[in-house]
Image (tube, helix red, strand yellow):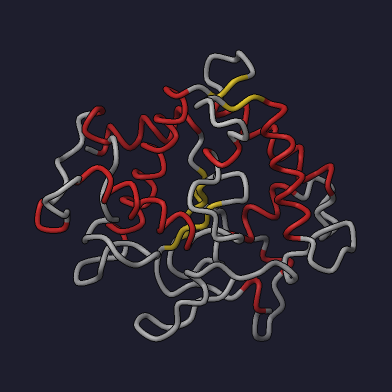
Amino acid sequence: MKRVIAGLIISLGLTAAPSIGAAATPATDPPQDQAPTTRPSIFISPYGEPFLSQAGEPYPVAAWFAGADADHDGRLTPEEFAADGRRWFGRLDQNGDQIIDPAEIAAYERLIDAAFLRVGAQSGPGGRGGPGGGGRRGGGPRLGMGEGGGQEDEPSRIQPREPRVTAAAESSERMARAGLLSVPQPVRSADRNMDQKITLQEWTATGERWFSLLDTRHQGYLTLEGLPQTAIQNDGGRRGRERR
């Protein structure tokens, strides 16, 4: 099982959030965007890239922002945002034909399942899977993992009728909870003409829309502090509030 997950991580570049530079963190209480999480957590970028963090590290939106902010000035411009999208498109487009095809979409979705599985396993026993709620222990249903030799889904957590539909819906829900815009399928949503393929032109147009939706103040740039919190961050109550 570990080999399957490792292979998916290597093939698509699953990103574990690094600790943000110590020099940027004051000696007093850390600002909200640097406050550490209390358990392993996950963030899905606007373009659908998964970022993971360990307990005690900042919520991984900070790692995504730091990587996308190419000049490290604390402002993410449309050009930097688009460049981050093109980089991830290149990862998803494994055969380099400038199209994300159904097989590459399926590979991506297996990667996402592996990411949630990894976070859920690290969260320890007794929970309801990883952050993002619903689902079973160990990160929720793994849609498509069986093709890579993964274990079967736990039958008690899957509805007896249309199990694949149920698993897909739960997978989409947890991705929405881990994203800034609550988009259930950030990669598939770029398929604007619904032909089961995503061209670079479609990807670019979708990225422009994501930036516009995130730039609520119409400043022409994004800041880490100005981003909306994900549902995972806002999930108070049962597990306590997490911050970026």
The quadrant the N terminus occupies is top left
User: Relative to the observer, which residue lies in front, 173 or 97?
Assistant: 173
Q: Name the residue rendered at 26%, 60% in the picture.
A: 135
Q: Name the residue rendered at 78%, 64% in the picture.
A: 223
In the displayed structure, 13 sits above or below 153; it is above
Where residue 25 sits: x, y (%)?
A: 69, 72
In the displayed structure, 110 sits above or below 90; it is below
In the displayed structure, 168 sits above or below 111; it is below
User: Relative to the observer, which residue lies in front, 122 or 105?
Assistant: 105
So how many labels did they put on this image?
Answer: 0
Direction right: furthest residue: 219
Where residue 30 sits: x, y (%)?
A: 65, 79
Where residue 179 sits: x, y (%)?
A: 55, 58
Quadrant hosting residue 243:
bottom right
Q: Name the residue rendered at 62%, 55% in the picture.
A: 63
Where residue 186 sits: x, y (%)?
A: 55, 46
- Whether residue 57 sits left or right of residue 149 in the image: it is right
Quadrant hosting residue 136:
bottom left
Q: Name the residue rendered at 32%, 37% in the picture.
A: 5
In the displayed structure, 104 sits above or below 143; it is above
The quadrant the C terminus occupies is bottom right
